[in-house]
Image (spheres, grey):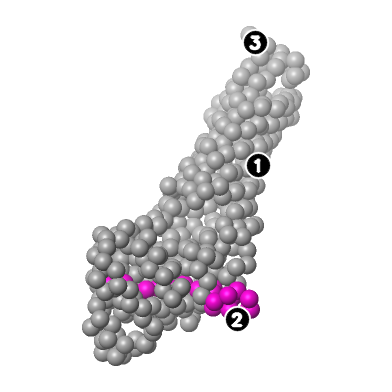
Amino acid sequence: MFSKLLLLLAASTLFASTSIAASVDFRLSINFKTNEALIDKDGEEVVRRLYIVSQEYPETKILISGHTDSIGTDEFNELLSFRRAESVEASLLGKGINRERLVVKGFGETAPLVPNDTAENRFKNRRVVASVVGLTDEEKEMILAGKNRKSIIKESVVVSDFKKTIKVIRKKPRRAYITGFLGPHWSTVFYGGSIDYEHSELTPLSFGVDVGYKLTKNWFVDGYFYYLPTTVKEGDSGIDFIGTDIVDYENNIYGLRIGKYLKKTNRYRFSVIGGVSSHILGAIKRRTATDYSFSKFQHIGITMGIRHEQRITGTWVFDSDLAYLFPVSVDNVESFSGKVWWRGILGVKKRLTKRLRLGIEYQAIYHESEFVFAPGITSTPEFLIQTLMFGLKYNF
């Protein structure tokens, strides 16, 4: 009786604009291993039978409810149960069913089928229950008699008598996000060869923005911009600037890239990324043996790299990113040859709400090239730019 009441409450929360006098649910259940959210071969067979029924009765809707056992935090189990339900949804979508017919909900550990006191019972509670809602009594009898499709196996049926309009809450996929960052950055520059120059500075406040969009199930695109203001004092550099004692410039970093997930589980995601990136860096330029001026060099390159996201707990995720940049062009120099140019990121994210995440990110940019400023004037500059950013990520 209690399980029937839970099903009725779930349906009354999730289905809208549907007056049902005698709603018959054809239910199929799939069980999962501990902490797993992917459907195995047996589960796929259950989904296949569910799809056959749904095709026979195209006017019905399908309620997909994910559940877990009691091991783990409430937040972790809520997310895991929703991911289990999503895996069933993805399988049905892959077979061609209309998304508008599907309603997905994760109940976490709040609706156990049996007490979580033994390993066998916990396995029974780690489940997804998919119900075809809106069948008539005649249609129910046809399904149970196997008159529609011979491959349909008889399953338990629950009849709920209620006459009311029920609201549907559709769990939309999070396809886009925007992240804003604030924090300090360090810039270290060394010039050798014909130009001898060193500089290092800590700037307490910089900011960054990162936006992204999920194109398909496995492809995504994102763009980023970091504003990193820097001040160079004449006394720190060991040389004399022309016409000034202090120079302000920006170590701005921005880029656009596209990525593809190579491997995804409920625990981690591994992907490859590629795109274009530009860094605007401050630099010393010498016109004669005693004539120094300050310039900004814009470096443009093509990026190739990898990204790894690992779930630590139910609310914490570790995120790492390493990309190599192939130099394409550098302005304000006669010629250049790229040596080493890479960008690395280490970060963690904590889920605050269903849409909001707190992020902490360490980023390092290292760039080494050989520049020819004028005949006889060459240098091999090294730039190391480091940031420690705190930000908020919002999923749309």
How far is disc 2 from disc 3 in space, using C-alphas?
77 Å
Residue at the spot of label 1: 362
Query: Relative to 57, is 392 on the left or the right?
Result: right
Callout 1 secondary element: strand
Q: Please tell me how crowded label 2 is: few (under 14), some (14-19), or many (20+) other residues with Cα within 10 Å.
A: few
Callout 2 secondary element: helix
2 and 3 marks in contact (CB < 8 Å)? no
The quadrant in which residue 144 appears is bottom left
Give the foreground label among 2 and 1: 2
Residue at the spot of label 2: 120
User: If you read the primary sequence from the N terminus, does the residue marked by circle 2 or circle 3 appear first?
Assistant: 2
User: Closer to the camera, 233 or 286?
Assistant: 233
Q: Residue at point 47% right, 68% down?
A: 66
How far is disc 3 from disc 1 in space, using C-alphas?
33 Å
Q: Please tell me how crowded label 1 is: few (under 14), some (14-19), or many (20+) other residues with Cα within 10 Å.
A: some
Residue range in magenta is 114-134
Q: Residue at point 25% right, 81% down?
A: 137
Query: Relative to 350, is 175 on the left or the right?
Result: left
Quadrant placement of the N terminus: bottom left
> In this view of the protein, can residue 147 be seen by the observer?
yes
